[in-house]
């Protein structure tokens, strides 16, 4: 019964997930090259940070329950926090 009620919600949020996922991917593609230019240690740290965020997100999605509802509340994908850059 719950799945039948959630079908319209699932359809509505799918487009939002795709847009949000693309936005976060492009954000990460700007952050990682900037970290690479800052040096190998900075790049390795940022890459490890992204891997940690992604692993935590996967664990969240593997938890039992309504995945779509969790995505609607917590968002889709992972984004590195903005790094301060020298000017």
Image: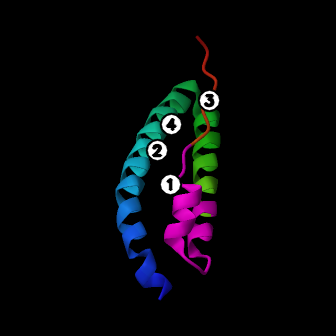
- Image point 63% across, 34% down: which residue? 42
- Image point 50% across, 36% down: which residue? 32
Q: Earlier in the sequence, mark 2 or mark 3?
A: 2
Q: Secondary structure at mark 3?
A: loop
Q: Secondary structure at mark 1?
A: loop
Q: Which mark is residue 32?
A: 4
What whole-number distance in Å separates the C-alpha atoms at marks 2 and 3?
15 Å
What whole-number distance in Å separates the C-alpha atoms at marks 1 and 2?
7 Å
Q: Which residue is mark 1?
A: 77
The rendered magenta stretch, by its main secondary structure, is classed as helix
Q: Earlier in the sequence, mark 1 or mark 3?
A: 1
Q: Are marks 1 and 2 in contact (CB under 8 Å)?
A: yes
Instruction: State the image coordinates of residue 72 (x, y, percent, origin top left).
Output: 52, 60
Q: Which mark is residue 83?
A: 3
Task: State the image quarter where residue 57 is shown.
Answer: bottom right
- Which of labels 1 and 4 is toward the front? 1
Q: Earlier in the sequence, mark 1 or mark 2?
A: 2
Residue range in magenta is 56-79
> Label 3: how many residues lie within 10 Å, few (<14), some (14-19) or many (20+)?
few
Q: Earlier in the sequence, mark 1 or mark 4?
A: 4
What whole-number distance in Å separates the C-alpha atoms at marks 3 and 4?
10 Å
Q: Earlier in the sequence, mark 2 or mark 4?
A: 2
Task: State the image quarter where residue 62 is shown.
Answer: bottom right
Q: Secondary structure at mark 4?
A: helix
- Which of labels 2 and 4 is toward the front? 2
- Image point 59% across, 79% down: which residue? 65
- Which of labels 1 and 3 is toward the front? 1
Judged from this view, the residue extending furthest toward the bottom is 1
Q: Which mark is residue 24?
A: 2
């Amino acid at each position: 019964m719950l799945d039948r009620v959630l079908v319209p919600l699932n359809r509505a949020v799918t487009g939002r997930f795709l847009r949000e996922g693309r936005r976060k991917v492009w954000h990460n593609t700007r952050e990682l090259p900037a970290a690479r230019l800052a040096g190998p240690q900075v790049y390795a740290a940022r890459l490890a940070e992204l891997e940690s965020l992604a692993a935590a997100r996967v664990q969240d999605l593997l938890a039992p329950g309504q995945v779509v509802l969790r995505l609607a509340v917590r968002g889709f994908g992972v984004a590195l926090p903005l790094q301060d850059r020298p000017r």
